[in-house]
Amino acid sequence: MQLAWFSLGMLSLGVGLVGIVLPLVPTTPLLLLAAFCFSRSSERLYNWLLSHRSFGPVIDDWRSRGAVNPQAKRMATVAILAVLGLSMAFGVGALILAIQAVTLGCVLLFIWTRPSY
């Protein structure tokens, strides 16, 4: 199981790092997943994530208070609106657009109901 947790942690970390430069890939949830996986497989990588200058505070805020940075909330909102706008611009079908709007609306509701720090 330790190898499975480690592999999932590395995959999550890798895709999360790609999400830093690709606007629609969710960085923060993938880093949280990587920390969770590394806590079960690699103490060294877990500690590295927690002590990282950029990633550590985000993970710590989520672990201790379930909090999300207000800037991250705004960025997520802009990205979600951009995705919906692109879907409409490309003429995605009404049913697909409705499913997408409901799903992304739930994501926004979850994000904005989390405390800020």
Image (cartoon, grey):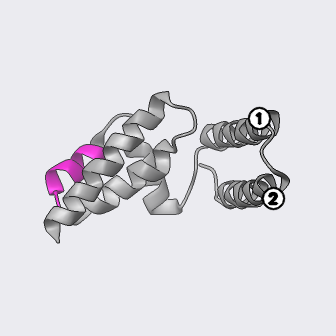
Magenta stretch, overall SS: helix
Q: Is residue 29 left or right of residue 102?
A: left
Between 9 and 116, which is closer to the camera in this rendering? 9
Q: Which residue shows up at 60% across the image and 40% down it? A: 72
Q: Which residue is mark 1?
A: 90
Image quadrant holding the N terminus, namely bottom left
Of the numbered discs in the image, which one, if any, rests on residue 95? 2
Residue 43 forms part of the magenta stretch = yes
Residue 36, x across and y down, in percent: 33, 61
Nearer-N-terminus badge (1/2): 1
For the question of whether residue 50 can be seen, the reply is: no
Q: How many marks?
A: 2
Q: Which of the 4 image quadrants contains residue 104?
A: bottom right
The residue lying furthest to the top in this view is: 21
For the question of whether residue 109 can be seen, the reply is: yes
Label 1 Cα crowd, 10 Å radius (few <14 / some 14-19 / many 20+)? few
Residue type highlighted by circle 2: Leu
- Distance from disc 1 to disc 2, alpha carbons, whole Å, reads 14 Å
Secondary element at image label 1 = loop
Residue type highlighted by circle 1: Phe
Q: Which residue shows up at 80% across the image and 50% down it? A: 93
Secondary element at image label 2 = helix
- For the magenta stretch, what is the residue range? 41-49
Q: Which of the 4 image quadrants contains residue 96?
A: bottom right
Residue 88 forms part of the magenta stretch = no
Q: Above or below — where is 2 with respect to 73? A: below
Q: Is residue 59 left or right of residue 5?
A: right
Q: Which residue shows up at 45% across the image and 61% down it? A: 64
